[in-house]
Amino acid sequence: MAVSKTKTPISEQPAEERIKNFDEVCLGYTPEEGMTEAARCLQCKDAPCVPGCPVSIDIPGFILAVKDGDMPKAVEIMSKYTNLPAVCGRVCPQETQCEGVCRLGRAKDFEPVAIGKLERLVADWNYAQPEARRFDVPKEKKGKVAVVGAGPAGLTVAGDLAKLGYEVTMFEALHAPGGVLMYGIPEFRLPKSIVQTEIEMITALGVKFDANTIIGKTVTMQEIMEEFDACFLGVGAGAPHFQGIPGTTLNGVYSASEYLTRINLMHAYEFPLYDTPTKSSKKVVVIGGGNVAMDAARSAKRLGADEVTIVYRRSLQELPARIEEYHHAVEEGILFHWLTNPTEYTDDGTGSLKGVTCIRMELGEPDASGRRRPIPIPDSEFFIEADTAIEAIGQGANKVLLSTFPELKLNKWGYIDADEKTGATSVPGVYAGGDIVTGAATVILAMGAGKDAAIAIDEYITNKKKQN
């Protein structure tokens, strides 16, 4: 049978409907649609998609099981490699990872296999069963490990170590585990119920959560190191960056992390059921070109803004956001100003934002990142009327823990200096991974760091106990 050149179509909420709600945009494959898509997989012997996945899932294996209609086997295969399959199936940038190296997609006029959508299908199918597949963990414990930060890196470490037979306690500063999965990614892209289900699967392994606990304040790292055999730091990079242009302190100017946290973790999208509304905005300008910028803009649209504009200093070709998120934003009526950068926020006379002065840019020679550097065009300023501006230009390391743990070596950017493969830090028994090491990156890269660190922590504790 000839292989279809294009991916099996997947159902989505129509744009005119979804801009009025926070329900999930992509509705996912049915098992029958999944079998059709899985049949497109070439089952390559060398499977370039596997090393293309940061957690090395046996992609051909689970896809073959889907093709055969054997969903329990697909779940069994996938569960060996990931603790967050439903999350990854929704938010991983597969187009630059597993799907980006798919051999079918390399053929002329062919699209790669929809690996991410199939991963989501398998996970969702599992959770819909009366008895979702769970791992049996060893009764005898090999040691005690503390995990600081309940985001994707920490959840991965915790789950993997629990499966290996460790007693794991996760410390989370906020009132709910999940990290960026809960406060950073909108409901329409990653429903909170999905995150909670996957966290429940991890707690079923025996992992304990200690919420509202700020390591460095509530509990010191010295106390952690005395009580536990090893510790993993996955505290993320939650300190927002601002451009620092005039008017940044005006009412109506937000960081994307503040804006999205209020919507996601504080349930502003469910107001008035929850008493945490956001500012009522009519004209919104979002600065940045990543997924966070898309999330903020699309959230503002759903909260009732009449006009939402994304201002990005480079062109569409350099846009770091997932192409799927860009297409969804365009469908939802989000406007774009390419090669544009804000230079000043204007006061309306009462301390609130009136608008944003911007300048046109052109691309010069490549900078350190390899992308062409944006250069301002003289005398090209123009004004965009806005009552809300949201800066989504990245985040830095939160200093609460780092400032109270001087033994920990940091790099020149203020992130934890950790071994690229193991996550080992300058302090024996302390490991780190995710955004606090790499700077703001993707969920799946944080998970990959977590998997590597879990292996290294197991080896460290095992060797330490042999020596004693």
Image (cartoon, helix red, strand yellow):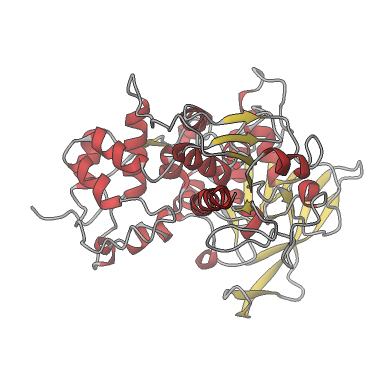
Q: Residue furthest left?
A: 1
- Of residues 266 and 295, the one drawn nearer to the viewer in this rendering: 266
- Report the front residue among 217 and 320: 217
When the figure is inspected, residue 245 is found, relative to residue 165, above or below; the finding is below
Q: Is residue 49 left or right of residue 73?
A: right
Q: Whole-percent x and y of residue 157? A: 53, 44
Judge whether residue 38 can be spotted in this image: yes
Q: Is residue 143 left or right of residue 357?
A: left
Q: Position of residue 75 (x, y in %)?
A: 31, 36
The reply to whether residue 258 is in sight is no
Occupied quadrant, residue 208: top right
293 vs 332, left or right, is: right
Q: Within the image, what quadrant is residue 143 found in? A: top right
Note whether 76 is above or below 269 in the view shown: below
- Number of labels in the image equals 0
Where's residue 60, x and y in %? 25, 52
| Residue 352 percent across, percent down from the top left | 85, 42
Foreground pick, 144 / 110: 144
Q: Nearer the viewer, residue 211 or 266?
A: 211
Residue shown at 38% from the left, 30% from the top:
136
Residue 443 vs 372, above or below: the answer is above
The residue at 25%/33% (across/down) is 72
Residue that lies at the very extreme toward the bottom in this rendered image = 365
